[in-house]
Image: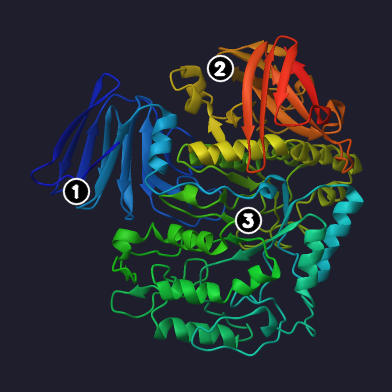
Amino acid sequence: MFEWEPNKKDSNLKISVNGQTASLYWNEQTKILTISLPYSAVYGMGERYNGLNQNNRIVKIEVEEKFCNQGDKSYCPSPFFFTDTGFSFCALSGSTLIFDFTQKNVITLHTPCGCKFVLNAGTPAKLISEYMSLSGPAVLPPDWIFGPWISANHWDTQKETEKQLEILKKHEFPATVLVLEAWSDEATFYIFNGAKYQEKQNGEPFAVGDFDYSESAYWPNPQEMINKLHKAGLHLVLWQVPVYKQQGKGEVINRQNNLDWEDAVKRSLCIRNLDGTPYKIPEEHWFPGSMIPDFTNPATYKTWFGKRQYLLDMGVDGFKTDGGEFVCTDAVAFYDGSTGKESRNYYPQQYTSAYTKFLGNNHVLFSRAGYIGQHTTPCHWGGDQQSTNDELQHVLSAGLSAALSGILFWGFDLAGFAGPLPTLDLYRRATMLACFTPIMQWHSEPDGGQFKELMPGGEGNNERSPWNMAMAYNSPEFEAEIRYWHWLRMNLQPYLTATAFRCVADSVPMMRPLVYEWPQDKAASKAEDEFLLGDAVLVAPLLEENQITREVYLPEGKWYAFFTGERYQGCQTISTTEATKFPVFIRDGYAVPLQASNIDSLGKPISQSSDSKLILLVAGATGKRTFTTNKSVLTCEWKNEEVSVSGIATDTIQIHHFC
């Protein structure tokens, strides 16, 4: 990997890539870089909804907010790509960039003068890892993020939130994270709705004791609520958006928001226009008229998080950082001296980096937007999708391209969160997929629809909970079916947490398209809707309505169906059967640790008693695997019928051998 900054005297470069030559030429007059090399596939470019391979496309690198059906737009782009020939390229620029992959064996890039490029050659694993190294190490999230997440926009009171604990218990569903979006005053976005307090001027911080909730109709005792959630094993994540809000007509004026606005203007805590006036989000965008904080200013960081520290002191476990795609012009100035021309794409990463720093260890940040260095933000989700089969395919493409851009931990709103409720079949297949992705979450828009004029929701309750889906379709048996996958997710915890540890240590995406591991296998490269979850598990989602079987390409080696144990030879395409349940396969020579009472209890509630064991699925005649976490190291080695395990008491483990 090396860096190159072309200029008049140094406008040509040739490098060797796997026995071939890549020729680069920079035209300073047109500001176009031309790269000539043989290639037929292009990967990376950030989170891309329109497919994994970006060959034959023009790709715009610009952070953009788009509600559903994103097409070629991206909340989370990256100016990094690699080709099937083993060549990689990254433009170190926050400007809007245009990559053109429509010409055979030629790539062109419109880029500003003075832009530095990072070039590399090697395998996908090497290229992605070394691209990540440009921005620093990845962040290991807490273990509890790998359980099921639950979220609904209409949980806007303490009573409704605490009700979810009763509902989970009644329906026997597990969850480890509860996300609240509609918790705040909808003006400052850091004060619980209905709280009384003395307003503070000049950016003074708040403390836990500054608020009186006794007369709140919404959150009469949030501390008590947080304690109840924690006692029930749930971690609380609160929604955030980076704005000094311009309140709309009909809203009750929030005096604290006005004081924060005045302070931001006076002390230049917000991004400014080039004439020094505050930049405001344009009318056609989300939160029009609002100012946005400038996180390149240390005073902004101190003030912004001084207002939010009390939430961590109360026990809030993390934040969902929505938005961030708000720099919509080049004609703005940041505190650090840069302008929008250089830094408009950097903004969402500045925003999430600030939150990541503030949260520190044992908390989580769940973010939608980002740029170079996305892996330094703990977790991402795929943004807004409506509940259709097309959108399920779109978001899968987004997750896989995100992985090839260095994003380690990613999830999506299973079956979409917007518009009319999904069909039961879509919800079923999306739940299966979510069970085998890094983050498993269901989320729901407000009742009636968030953007009624664009995409009205159904009448009544839009909640995407399993029990509401069963009730809405008068299908009580559906709830039990979906419960299985939530408990299977809990069974998978040992494998997921050990995989996460390795992913951070070795800069490896948790969710990997087959081309990552088998770049020379053309059939694997074409299988754009399959992926590895960690080293051992291959997943082939069901993406079509009422689909129960599909064709699956299995790369080299032997593979064992997760739910039946049936063995398949690799380097071939197989047709699954209904008995396969969901196309998941374990790789020969690998192992999967699970938590359950026994192998027959997978998908059932996990006992909290001492009979809960570690179930070790080992695949193939021989193998040796080590599973490391912050808490333990487990090593297993097997040859034929004999399996040896170290790092755990043998009476707490059960071996299940696929061979």
Q: Nearer the viewer, mark 1 or mark 2?
A: 2
> Circle 1 is placed at which residue position?
31
SS at circle 3: loop
Q: Is residue 268 left or right of residue 377?
A: left
Mark found first going from the N terminus, 1 or 2? 1
Out of 361 and 426, give the one closest to the viewer. 361
Q: Amino acid at mark 2?
A: Pro
Q: Where does the N terminus fall, quadrant-wise?
A: top left
> Circle 3 is placed at which residue position?
362
Q: Residues within 10 Å of mark 2 (few under 14, many from 20)?
A: many
Q: Quadrant of residue 584?
A: top right
SS at circle 1: loop
Q: Residue 147: x, y in percent?
A: 72, 46
> Circle 2 is placed at which residue position?
555
The answer for how far apart the CA atoms under marks 1 and 2 are is: 42 Å
Q: Quadrant of residue 157?
A: bottom right
Q: Is residue 48 left or right of residue 411?
A: left
Q: Amino acid at mark 3?
A: Asn
- Residue 106, compared with residue 630, is above or below; it is above
Q: Nearer the viewer, mark 2 or mark 3?
A: 3
Q: Residue 208: x, y in percent?
A: 68, 78
Q: Where does the C terminus fall, quadrant-wise?
A: top right
SS at circle 2: loop
Identify the residue at image location x=28%, y=27%.
105
